[in-house]
Image: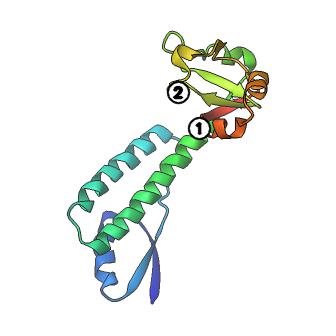
Amino acid sequence: MKNLSIEHTYTLLNLAKLLSQYDINIEIDEPHFDRSNKEETVIALIDDISNYAELLRKEDETTKELISKLIDIKCNLIKELVKDKRGELVLTKEELLKFDGSNGNPAYVAIDGIIYDVTNNRTWLDGVHFGLVAGRDLTEEMNSCHENKETLLLKLTPVGKLK
């Protein structure tokens, strides 16, 4: 069995379908994007995924398998781009104070030097959790309250680091 490695284009789907009839697999390389404008790239990736989802309803199984692989690649790129963006946030304790969940601000908390977004966490309504207020380093409070700290932190979204 032969393997080809090419970057995705829409014609790839037709080519892949044709080559699969001759027992040739296609390795799809991760597309290369200008990562300097992450928001536009993420929007373009989401648009691509929407187009692929429409194709999934119409195509045969071989093509659906390739489309699914392309969707996975695009989803992983989105995750990396969003992770990269989140990793750029570095705040001091003073800067963190404004992220208390009030006045439309997101609710962030720092634990062990990592800043987590608790804005949409239902246990942090309006940036308050059992008397604790978002926008602060809550490492000591977390250590004294929760034996299963690591498990709880896995449920939160990291957005940066405390300086």
Residue 91 marker? none
Q: Is residue 102 above or below residue 83?
A: above
Q: Secondary structure at mark 1?
A: loop
Quadrant of image for the N terminus: bottom left
**Is the residue under label 2 in contact with that under label 1 (CB below 8 Å)?**
yes
Q: Amino acid at mark 2?
A: Asn
Residue 5 seen in the figure: yes
Count of labels in the image: 2
Q: Which residue is mark 2?
A: 121
Query: How dense is the environment of label 2, judged by Cα within 10 Å: few (below 14), some, or many (20 and up)?
Result: some
Image quadrant in which you'd find residue 65: bottom left
Outermost residue, left side: 58
What colour scheme governs how the chains and residues are painted in the rendered image of this protein?
rainbow
Residue 86, image x and y in percent?
60, 36
Q: Which residue is mark 1?
A: 155
Residue 118, image x and y in percent?
57, 26
Q: Is residue 36 above or below residue 140?
A: below
Quadrant of image for the C terminus: top right
Q: Along the line of sight, which residue is nearer the eye, 124 or 63?
A: 124
Query: Residue placed at 78% from the left, 25% from the top?
Result: 144
